[in-house]
Amino acid sequence: MSRYLRSLTVVLVCCLIPMAQAKRAPNLEFKSLSGQTQKIVDLRGSITVINFWATWCGPCVEELPLLSQLSQEYADKKVRFVAISADESADNPKTRAKIDLFLSHQKLAMEVWLGADLDMLDRLQLGNVLPATVILDEQGEIVARVMGEAHEDDVKGPVDWLLNGRTGPAPTPVTKRY
């Protein structure tokens, strides 16, 4: 095989690997704080950072202020941040009161949805550990996953890569922080 064909093959493989790793997020349904149905498919058109958390999760409490800050930082760049509670029985008045109290202390600058469960995390290939974060491109393709407490670079790297037209090396598809 000529040097040219080997080089072309390497370039094609390097370009196709990130595309092969991309997978459209399943169209899961949740509820907004006001009770409206929210679907992942409706997030298409924006780069989206989806974080799964719970009131009882210590690392979640540590992570949410960072995500809220990043939400404000990217607010003018067509990037959405959604925090989805995995608290059991979020429609139960006692659980909902706990979530509302938690949110009143956190003062998050991002959308908050309710109704996540471990099956949904599994369908997104996030395992069964909270917190967990998935980053979607404008077409709803999963670009990166963070299992455990995300660091700033775990979020900014993939988001900036998408905002910059996917130039440079692709982000790490899965980061484990536990």
Image: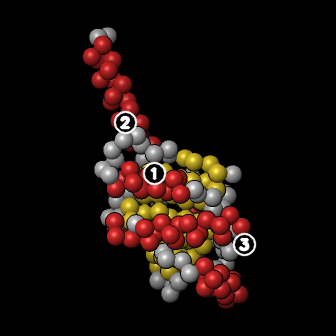
- Structural crowding at the residue carrying mark 3, measured as other residues with C-alpha within 10 Å and reported as few (<14), some (14–19) or many (≥20): some
**The residue under label 1 is which amino acid type?**
Gly
Q: Residue at x 52, y 71 (%)?
A: 68
Residue 29 seen by the camera: no
Splitting the image into 4 quarters, where does residue 83 fall? bottom right
Name the element at disc 2.
helix
Q: Residue furthest top?
A: 1
Query: Up-down: is 22 above or below 52?
Result: above
Which mark is on residue 14?
Answer: none
Tell me which corner region of the image, top left, top right, bottom left or bottom right, holds residue 140: bottom left
Q: Which quadrant of the figure has residue 8?
A: top left
Neighbor class of circle 1 (other Cα within 10 Å; few <14, some 14-19, many 20+) is some
**Which residue, given by chain and number where applicable, does mark 1 sit on?**
157
Cα distance, mark 1 to mark 2? Answer: 20 Å
Amino acid type at circle 2 is Leu
Q: Residue at point 32% right, 21% down?
A: 7
Residue 66 sits above or below residue 92 on the image: above
- Measured as percent of width and height from the top left, residue 97 is found at 66, 88
Residue 129's x, y, as percent?
A: 67, 58
The residues tagged by marks 3 and 1 sit, at their Cα atoms, a distance apart of 28 Å
Residue at mark 3: 56
- Residue 72 placement (x, y as % from top left): 44, 72
Instruction: Determine crowd level at label 2: few under 14, some 14-19, many 20+ residues with C-alpha closer than 10 A.
Output: few
Residue 42 in the image: above or below residue 143:
below
Q: Is residue 47 visible to the viewer in this orientation of the structure? A: yes
Relative side of 93 to 33, left or right:
right
Callout 3: SS: loop
The residue that label 2 is drawn on is 16
User: At 29% from the left edge and 11% from the top edge, which residue is drawn?
Assistant: 2
For the residues labelled 3 and 1, say whether their Cβ atoms are less than 8 Å apart: no
Q: Earlier in the sequence, mark 3 or mark 1?
A: 3
**Label 1's element?**
helix
